[in-house]
Image (cartoon, rainbow, N blue to C red):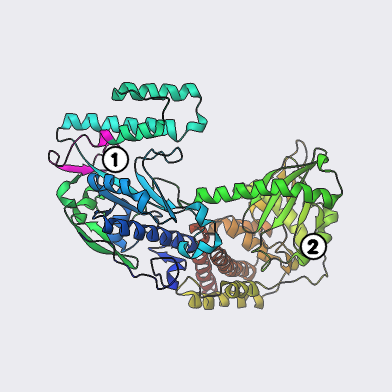
Amino acid sequence: MKYMEYEKKVSGESKLYFPKDFFRGEFRCGFFVSSNMKKYWAAQLEILAEIDRICRKHNITYFADSGTLLGAVRHNGFIPWDDDLDIAMLREDYDKFAMICSGELDKKYLFAKAFQKTEFAQCFSRVYENNDIKMDDLSNECYFKNPHLAGVDIFPLDYIAPDKDEENVQSELIAAINELSHGVVRDNNDNTEGEIEKLLCKIEEIANVKIDRTKAIEAQLGELYDNLCKLYSGDEAKEVTTFPMPYLRPNWRFNKEWYDDTVLIDFEYFKLPCPIGYKDILTAGYGEYTNYERGDAMHAYPAYSKFKRGYIEEWESYLKKTLKKELSIFLNKSEERLEVVKMLKYDIRNTTMLFKIDEKEFTFRIPGNKIFNIANYEREKKIYDILKKYEITENVIYLSDNNGSKMTSMLQDTHPLNTTDKEAVLDFLQVLAFVHLLDVSDNVSFDIWEYIEKYEELWGDDSYRVDYEKTKKKIRECYDYTQSQPKAVGITHFDLSGENILVSTCENEEDDIRIIDWEFSGIQDTHIDLAVFALNSSYSREDVDWLIDSYFCGKCTKNTRTKIYCYMAVCALMFNNYYEYLDRNDEDMTQEQANYYNIGLEYYEIYCDMMKDC
């Protein structure tokens, strides 16, 4: 048998060596893989190296399985849109590994056997990171600074009944136990005692067993499930599978000879043991497996999104505890009069909390620590001072031009602007045009190209895009065109989106429209706002032209239209650079955000076409 081949790290606690470039975000098969995902992949491979060590010591064979096997064969690594690592063991090796694993594992890791823990109601086992140790900053090295809890799933390969009728009974019974045990174990907190008892009685009836209510139910369900999977041996069966898959996907069945030996296949910077019949296995399981097509995963991508939600909930809980006291001191109000209600908004830029004073509602903005490099609160404060008499923004009570903390009275009965509702957008454009026409003299201007290069500086590295410099040179042509054209100088929001435009609809009255969050605002060519709004609204070329025609009442000149197209190209590149910056700071750039780069190139081509007609 063959085991994982890898290069050991010379220093530090990690077993594996990864070159620095591995942890950069990159595009694979047109799909963006974030820096966070690369760290998550690395942490999983490190766990696999620990599993591999135990398997070598105890002569246990394991195989790359499912999406991991497909990734090895088709991509020589992870499938770009896959986020977990799966291995499989024939039942004899699986049981042996489960018996010795906990006693052999490095203290950095833990082992969860199927259905043995209330929080792990699965039909497979997992080796995962010990979160108590992971939280220790001194152990960051051995987890590749991956902030999310990683693990490797281990599936048992069991034998399918040789008789078709027996197979149907076995498969249906296993599927039923799996489904019902999920209801008992995983959803334990959501079920009443009567509902749990009803499920247990149904399991007893189906499997003809007795479950002892005085003992750990999870362990009994796990034992029952395993016994059902192990009804047949390799001597009598011809095929193996990972139950309950045949019930869900009838083609998920493989000749046992395909697992007679292992072959090493390249996987990222390593080689993974794969079943010798991997071609037949992948054909049986996936059909034309060489086709590049993104399928649906068994869980939401990325897998660590649930951990991120947990961090946000912890942050909200922390703020609820601390903000009340701080606001009491700041506002000189007794804590009894204050209530911190909930988090309204969270992203890497800002956290907004809702709080009450004597039942009156207010919001408090807390800027994120990554925003100070790019926001300008002094400029924002000046813009609010200019606009405060027009009732166009939120009602700002306090704004620090030093750290960006902001307090506002809550706007009641409002909703974000629906950017697909053209009637609502037309109403908004009237407000925007009024802002743009205000006479201003304050020197609070900014330059878009400076933003583009500012993000480049903040990267501390080259762009993820291999053709970035060529693209930047093209987009510079668009920027130079904007600078050659007359400008409509005025107050520019620079971050217009549906979420930053609040609408209050009152019966028999005009809608009250407020534009909020001006931390990127300044005095600039106001036509930039049209470009940014169109980009943030994901408008098509047709929608963009409708927006321009509506704003200019059908009287937009060709040069001005071309200038707005150019602003879209320039701002799209700026957004790309901004999201690359976030990706380097543990906030994944999504596929939609990554698409801004292509949108920039698209509008560069539109600019080129416009210039041909001149």
Residue neighbourhood size for the residue with mark 2, other residues' Cα within 10 Å, grouped as few (<14), some (14–19), many (≥20): many
Residue at the spot 26% in from the left edge and 49% down from the top edge: 89
Query: Residue 75's mark?
Result: none
In the image, farthest residue toward the front = 103
Residue neighbourhood size for the residue with mark 1, other residues' Cα within 10 Å, grouped as few (<14), some (14–19), many (≥20): some
Q: Mark 1 points at which residue?
A: 245
Does 560 sit above or below residue 214? Answer: below
In the image, farthest residue toward the left = 235
The residue type indicated by label 1 comes to Met
Q: Mark 2 points at which residue?
A: 381
Quadrant showing the C terminus: bottom right
Residue 242 falls inside the magenta stretch: yes
Position in image of residue 116 (x %, y %)? 39, 38
Q: Is mark 1 on a helix, strand or loop?
A: helix
The residue stretch that appears in magenta? 227-250
Q: What element carries label 2?
A: helix
The residue type indicated by label 2 comes to Lys
Nearer to us in this view, 147 or 27? 147
Nearer to us in this view, 402 or 275? 275
* Residue 207 is at least partly visible in this image: yes
